[in-house]
Image (cartoon, helix red, strand yellow):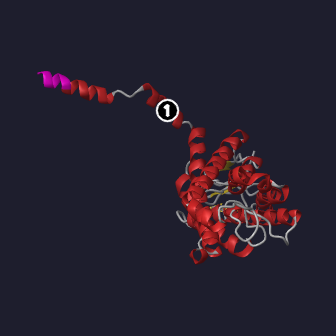
Amino acid sequence: MGSGCCFRSTRMSKMVTPPAVTRMKAVLQKEMVREFLAEFLSTFVMMVFGLGAIAHMVLGDKMGSYLGVNLGFGFGVTMGVHMAGNISGAHMNAALTFTNCALGRMSWKKFPVYVLGQFLGSFLAAATIYCLFYTAIIDYSGGRLTVTGPTATANIFATYLPDHMTLWRGFLDEVLVTGMLQLCLLAITDKGNNPALQGTQALVIGILVVIIGASMGMNSGYAINPSRDLPPRFFTSFGLGRQVVAPRTVVGASGGPPLGAYLGAIIYLIFIGSSIQQEPQNHLCCPRPCLTQPMTSSLTLSLCPRQQTFKSSSPMAPVHCSCI
């Protein structure tokens, strides 16, 4: 009898959820909180793979290569898309978040939430890589951390222009390379055009990053992402001082990508997005001036926030649609 009472009491106690846990679950179910955490974690994963690959190239003698860096960032992006694509869209890039907001794909009130998640994830990734390769960094640099020179280690964490590049050439380089990124991303995810097969978008986007690095990464290191460059740069400033945030090293990597992403999206809208899209259910999506598709990957944009589609009553009847 006593044991039965004890059993019932234990069973009932297991069913009681502490108020703190209940409140935490309620907070974590909020849309913005989930999007923040998704951006944080996906950016962390991307940056750990990418910065780890750079560390191998810089510190590991024959254990790393530039191709390895491209593969590290490319497939880091792929893993990030798989991790957060259906929650936040896995932007992992403040330039792409900016473009989504500027073109009406998402509310501006989400912009700081996304960017904060990305920056914190990137900063933590830089700290993780520093701790992971600490002894190798000290051995390689002789205990003297530097930004330039034969034993420089700051380039593990952020991009720095070579001597032949001026500030403005670096800026324009980032504008062009990020524009190419955005242009191709829209093509990959645009269901009204010729998108990647369902389920392969994350892989194709990763391959795109590899191709960009292999073909256009030499001049400025293809930062193409303020969330990739700024937080690790701030992390290294604790040990290397203000030289890591000098205008020549920051303007291109941080200012060029937002402009490039926006221009890339506009170019896609003008040249490709104005074509009429035929869909199999006997209706058309807005032929102009916009292109709207569901977000299926990290970097998908919608160039029209509002859409109305009118299905025809007969398979042979004319179809009408409008954007309002």
Q: Which residue is mark 1?
A: 24
Check the image and report above or below for 58 versus 22.
below
Any magenta on residue 298? no
Asked if one can make out residue 31 in the rendered structure from this viewpoint, the answer is yes
Quadrant housing residue 107: top right
Quadrant housing residue 59: bottom right
The reply, left or right, for residue 96 in relation to residue 311 is right
Mark 1 crowd level (few <14, some 14–19, many ≥20, 10 Å Cα): few
Could you tell me what secondary structure mostly forms the magenta stretch?
helix
Residue 296: horizontal and vertical position, in percent?
Answer: 59, 56
The reply, left or right, for residue 188 in relation to residue 10 is right
Give the quadrant of the N terminus: top left
At x 70%, y 43%, the residue is 111
The amino acid at mark 1 is: Met
Check the image and report above or below for 56 versus 19.
below
At x 18%, y 22%, the residue is 5
Magenta region, residue range: 1-6
Looking at the rendered structure, the number of numbered marks drawn on it comes to 1
Asked if one can make out residue 295 in the rendered structure from this viewpoint, the answer is no
Q: Secondary structure at mark 1?
A: helix
At x 56%, y 50%, the residue is 41
Residue 102: horizontal and vertical position, in percent?
Answer: 77, 48
